[in-house]
Image (cartoon, rainbow, N blue to C red):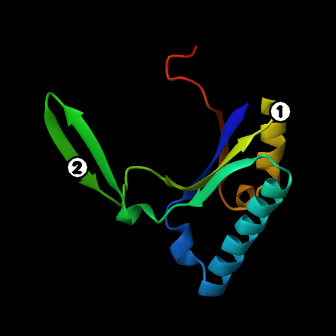
């Protein structure tokens, strides 16, 4: 079963780190991903640029609205993800608890499924 581990970081946290602290955090995440790959359960993983560089697209009544980041109405931003293939939700949650980001952010565990699944 495929699960997405979504890294939800507190807004502004990256800017508060020193360059060295940022490199250390990123290296820890890379090592975590390498460990998942060695176990044969990593499907994909990516880090995302700060949402100040993002844009939201919404179409309502035929009108396209664009909202440039940062998205200040939210207290968190998605900082990256790991897509894993494991046997159970329990296993996915155990892996999320081992993720270095769980110490400085929130790791949300979501099973992949069709959008109309109950």
Image spot of residue 90 (x, y percent): 83, 33
Image quarter of the C terminus: top right
Q: Kindly state the secondary structure of the residue where label 2 is placed.
A: strand
Q: Is residue 30 left or right of residue 36?
A: left
Q: Which mark is residue 90?
A: 1
Residue in the picture at 78% in, 63% down: 34
Q: Which residue is mark 2?
A: 66
Q: Is 104 displayed left or right of 57 in the figure? A: right
Query: What residue do we see at 63% from left, 77% from top?
Result: 22
- Give the vertical position of 116 relative to 37 (above or below): above
For the residue pair 39 and 50, the one nearer the viewer reads as 39
**15 over 56 or under it: above or below:** below
Q: Which mark is residue 51?
A: none
**Mark 2 and mark 1: Cα distance apart in space:** 38 Å
Marks 2/1 in contact by CB < 8 Å: the verdict is no
Q: Nearer the viewer, residue 21 or 117?
A: 117
Quadrant assignment, res 91 = top right
The quarter of the rendered structure image containing the N terminus is top right
Could you tell me residue 77's position as x and y percent?
A: 50, 55
For label 1, the SS is helix
The residue positioned 82% from the left and 49% from the top of the image is 40
Q: Residue 102 in the image: x percent, y percent?
A: 73, 55
Q: Residue 24 appears at what percent x and percent y?
A: 71, 78
> Farthest residue in the top direction?
118
User: Mark 1 Cα within 10 Å, few/some/many (few <14, many 20+)?
Assistant: few
| Residue 77 horizontal side relative to residue 118, left or right | left
Name the N-terminal-most of marks 2 and 1.
2
Report the residue at 37% width, 65% height from top: 52
Instruction: Relative to 113, say whether 74 is above or below.
Output: below
Dividing the picture into quadrants, the one containing residue 53 is: bottom left
């Amino acid at each position: 079963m495929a699960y997405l581990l979504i890294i939800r970081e507190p807004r502004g946290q990256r800017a508060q780190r020193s360059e060295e602290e940022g490199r250390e955090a990123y290296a820890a995440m890379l090592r975590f991903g390498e460990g998942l790959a060695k176990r044969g359960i990593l499907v994909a993983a990516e880090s995302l640029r700060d949402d100040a560089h993002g844009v939201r697209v919404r179409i309502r009544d035929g009108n396209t609205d664009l909202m440039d980041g940062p998205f200040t109405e939210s207290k968190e931003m998605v900082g990256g993800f790991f897509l894993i293939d494991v046997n159970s939700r329990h296993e996915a949650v155990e892996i999320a608890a081992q993720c270095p980001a769980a110490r400085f952010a929130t790791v949300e565990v979501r099973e992949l499924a069709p959008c109309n699944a109950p």
